Amino acid sequence: MKIGISLNNIRFSYGKNDVIKNVDLEISNRDIVSLVGPNGAGKTTLLKLIGGLLKPSHGRVYVMGKQIGEISPRSRARIVSTVPQNPRVPQNLKLSEFVMLGRNAHLSLTQWESNEDIQIVNEALEVTDTLNLKERHLGKISGGELQRGMLALALAQKSPVLLLDEPTSNLDLSHQSKMMSLIANSHESRVGPTVIGIHDLTLAARYSNRMILVSEGKVFADGTPEEVLTPANIKEAYGAEVAIIPHPEGGSPVVLPVFNSYPQTK
Amino acid sequence: MSNHPSHLGSNHEKSWRFPWLRISLGIFGTIICCLVAASIGSVGINPNSTLLIALSRVPIIDISQTWPDSWDTILWKLRFPRVILALIVGASLSVSGATFQGLFRNPLADPYLIGVASGASLGATVVFLTGIPFSYGGISILPIASFTGGLIAVSVAYGIAVRSSSTRLTTLILAGVAIGSFTTAISSLLMLRSDPDLRVVLSWIMGGFIKAQWNHSLFLIPYLLPGFILTFAYSRILNTMQLDEEYASSLGVNIERTKKILILVATMMTAAVVSFSGLIGFVGLVAPHIVRLIWDSDFRTLIPMAAIVGGCFLVIADLIARTILSPGEIPVGIVTALCGAPFFIYLLLRNRQDTT
C-alpha cells in the first residue's frame, strides 16, 4: 500500500488559537477517507493543510511524495484538486468555461485550450452528469448542479489526489447520494487518495473505507467506519447520545439520535 | 453536441479559439472611426480624401495628389497625431481598467481607484511647478515623473493592504482611495503655493489632446505595447482569478505574483498616458463594460476589445470636445464624464438588481 498523504506532527494556529494540535496521519493511495467531527473541530483547516493552501506552523505535510506547502501553486494543482465549501463563483460564467478553469495548471501563459483540453472537460461534464448544462451560466443552475460542476472542474484538473469540503451540504436526499457515488466512482480512476470532509456520519460511513474523527484539533478516532462510529466515541466527540444500527442494505453503520436524551418541551 | 435547451437564450457554443473575427472587425471599425474623426473639424475634408491622404504617405503606395496642400498639412500635422494619441490613450486606460476590474473582482474599479492616476498627476504637477525642464538630454522627464508618482501611490496602497492581512482587496481599494485624496490634496497645495499662472497645469489636469504631437505617440508605444501583450497573455489567469483567491490558488494561480505583475503593468500604462493626456476619467471604467454587454466577460475577448472600444470612445469624445463649441474647445475629460457618470450610475443600479 503506497502512502499518498502523510502528516508528521502537524500544528497550525490562527494567531494564538491552536486549530490543529500534533496531528500524525498516513493515508494510503487506495483510501477514501471521510473526515468527520463537530463544527470547529478543524476539518476544513486539515483539508487546506493537505491541499497546500495553508502552511503548517510546525511539522511537514507530504502529498504524493512532495512537501505540498513548499512547491509552486502550479505543481501543487497538478497533484491535488480541491472542491471548496461554498466558494464565490462568477454568476455570468458558463459551466463549460468554469470547468475549463481546471485545465489552468496544465497550460502555460501563452497556451490556449487545445482539443484535448476540450475533450477532457467534456468527459468531466459527462461523468458528473452535467453535460446538458454546459452552456448554462452558473447563476442559473441549482446548488446540486453547481456541486457537481465543481466536482467536474476538479476531475478536469486530472490530479491524483482529490479533497472535498462538505460536498453534500445544501443538497437534498437524492443529490447527496448521487454526489457521493460520483466521488466514489472518480476515486477508481485516480491513483491517489480521496479525502472528504463531511458532516453526515451515515452517508460518510456508506461511501468511505476509512473514517477519521477529529475533535478539538486532534485525531480522536481513526479506522473503518464501524470502528470509529461507536456510541462512546460520538458521545465523547460530539457530546450527543446516539444509537447505531447496521444499514438494511450492506450493513454500514447508521447513526440515529437518541430522543430521550434531551429534555422534552410539552 | 449542442443539445442545450434553446429557451436559455444563451447564444452560441463557447469557442476556445483566438477571437480573430471580433478583433479584425474591431480594427476595421477603428480605422473608419479615426478617418471620420480626422475628416471633421473647422476645415471639413471628405472622408475619401482623408483616406487617400493617409495612404499617400505609405511608402509603397503611389497616389497622385488631387487635394490642396493645406489638407495634407492639417491632417498630418494636426489631426492625425491627435486622433492617434486619443486612440492610444483610450486603449491603454481601458486595458488598465479591465485589468484592475479583473484583479479586484470589482466591476467599478478603474485606473483611478487605487490612486494610480492621482499619484501620477502629482508627479507631473511637481515637474510643472518646480520648473524642472520637461526633457533632459532628449529624455522626457514628465512621463518618468508621473510614472514614479503613480507607482509610489500604488506601492503605498499595496503595502498598507499587505500589512492589514485580512481581506486585502477591500483594504487595497480603500487605501487607494485615501492615497488618491491625499496626493490630490498635495497637488492642489503645490498649485496654490506656486506661480500664479496655473493655466498650463490646470489645463493639463483637465485632460486633453490639444498639443498632441507624433512624438507623444511614439514615446508611449514602448511603454504600452509590452503592457498590452503581457496583459493579454495573462487573460486566462485573469479568468481564473474571478473565482475567490483560495480557489484560484488551488487551480495553480500564483496569486501574489500575478497581482504584483499586473498592478505594475497597469500602473505603467496608466501613468504613461496620464503624463501626456492629463486626467481623463471614466474611459477605463466604461469601455470594459461595453465589451461585456456586447460580447462576453472572457478576458481574452475583454482585453483586446476593451482596447478597441476604449480607443474609439476617446477618439469620438475628443472629436466632440473640439467641435461642439467650435472654434473653442472644451476639455475632453468633461465629455467623458458627461457620458461616463450616468453609465456608472446605471451600473450601480444594475449591480444592485443582480445581488438581490
Image (cartoon, grey):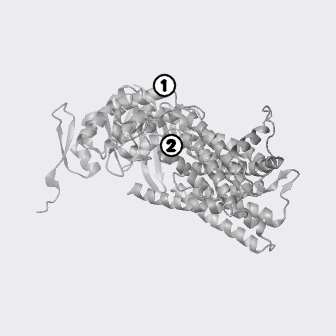
SS for callout 2: loop
Q: Position of residue B312 (x, y in %)?
A: 63, 48
Q: Amino acid at mark 1?
A: Glu
* Quarter of the rendering occupied by the C terminus of chain B: bottom left
Query: Who's the residue at 44% across and 27% down the image?
Result: A120
Residue toward you, B268 or A187: B268
> Which residue ends up furthest to the right in the rendered image?
B137
Q: Position of residue B259 (x, y in %)?
A: 59, 48
Residue A45 falls left or right of residue B53: left
> Which residue ends up furthest to the left in the rendered image?
A266
Report crowding for label 1: few under 14, some 14 to 19, many 20 or more residues within 10 A (C-alpha): few
Q: Position of residue A142 (x, y in %)?
A: 32, 44
Residue B94 falls left or right of residue A180: right
Asked if badge 1 and badge 2 are on a common chain, one would say: no
Residue carrying label 1: A116
Query: Who's the residue at 88% across and 51% down the image?
Result: B137
* Quarter of the rendering occupied by the N terminus of chain B: top left
| Residue B235 drawn above or below residue A38 | above
The reply to whether residue A59 is in sight is no
| Residue A185 drawn above or below residue B323 | above
> Which residue ends up furthest to the front in the rendered image?
B66
Residue B76 falls left or right of residue A208: right
Residue carrying label 2: B295
Judging from the image, mark 1 belongs to the subunit labelled A
Q: Amino acid at mark 2?
A: Trp
SS for callout 1: helix
Judging from the image, mark 2 belongs to the subunit labelled B
Distance between mark 1 and mark 2 Cα atoms: 26 Å
Which of discs 1 and 2 lies nearer the camera? The answer is 2
Q: Position of residue B300 (x, y in %)?
A: 56, 39
